[in-house]
Image (cartoon, rainbow, N blue to C red):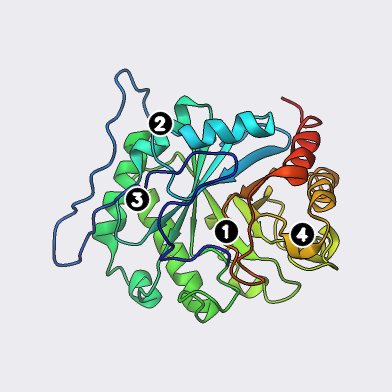
Amino acid sequence: MRRRIRHRGAITLAVAIPAVLLITAAYGLSGGFKGRPGAQPGGASGQIGPKAPPVRKGLNIGVYEPGVAPPLTSIRKFGTAVGHQPQLLLIYSEWNTAFRTGVAWSAYGEHMTVVDQMEPEYISIQAIARGHYDRYLRAYADSVKKFGHPIIIGFGHEMNGNWYSWHVLPSTFIAAWRHVVSVFRQQHADNVTWMWTVAHAATGLRQYWPGGKYVNMVGIDGYFEKPGDTFASIFGVTIRAIRKITTDPVLISETAAGPRTGHQAADVARLFAGAETDHLTGLVWFNEAQDSGLHHQDWLLHGRVLAAFRSAVKRVPR
């Protein structure tokens, strides 16, 4: 909900240098695959089996920064600033663009796992379910398979909200989700952990559930936006609802605390405490200055908020 599909150019981060935008090439149904994934380093290992864990045990820390590109200088600076090199790197992949192989290899070199959210913006979800985009999906899956190391992939995150174009009938979304997963499996991209990502909500989750055979992990997107927001009000009810559906690991896949709460530093402490108490797989901080309304605030870590993050992350086992 917080990321605009067509977001503005490079943004200067409080804890990082301005990022370089990664330009991806388009793929058309009537044309060939024109993406240019990054070069694979020499001596790369082969495919990882389906049971390879994408995350370590305990609370994994992740980050999203706009325009991230190899050699991930901004991510290193983020790790230095917070005193903890992240284990997860969140990226978003617009539909009809190549798998960002260069970013994936750079993340692997930094001992991070990529969390890749595929965004079918203004694409017919029914057409995806019917196989009209299979050529693109096969090419994407082949690139992921060639990469060969554990990666987390989501499709149509926050589908239970009404702010993205892929908010469609649950039956349509489920059909598309299952089809995407099936295409990847047919291409033997067995290094993928499939993460079903929802916007925090108390109701309406089960109707979008694709089924245990098609999901390995659950993500929850939620932010501290208003003075009355707490971990329990944002995530608690959703976590309980999810655990009635599945026992899969749960990741806070997109989160931050904005200045409009009036207590950002305390929100950070509550975020870490709640994630640990509920035995979550980790949390991913959305580190971008948006600052344009309640849902698009300045989410950067700086000042007292950065200090609170540094303090909280010290208690996370290495």
182 left or right of 255?
left
Q: Which residue is mark 3?
A: 186
240 up-or-down from 89: above or below = below
Q: CA distance from mark 2 to mark 1?
A: 29 Å
Q: Amino acid at mark 2?
A: Pro
Give me the residue at 34% from left, 22% from top: 44
Q: Nearer the viewer, residue 298 or 198?
A: 298
Closest to the camera, between mark 2 and mark 1, is 2
Badge number at residue 128? none
Closest to the camera, between mark 3 and mark 4, is 4
54 left or right of 81?
left
Label 1 crowding class (10 Å Cα cut-off): few <14, some 14-19, many 20+?
many
Give me the residue at 75% from left, 40% from top: 309
- Residue at the farthest top position: 43
Label 2 crowding class (10 Å Cα cut-off): few <14, some 14-19, many 20+?
some
Closer to the chain start, of discs 3 and 4, is 3
Q: Nearer the viewer, residue 108 or 146?
A: 108
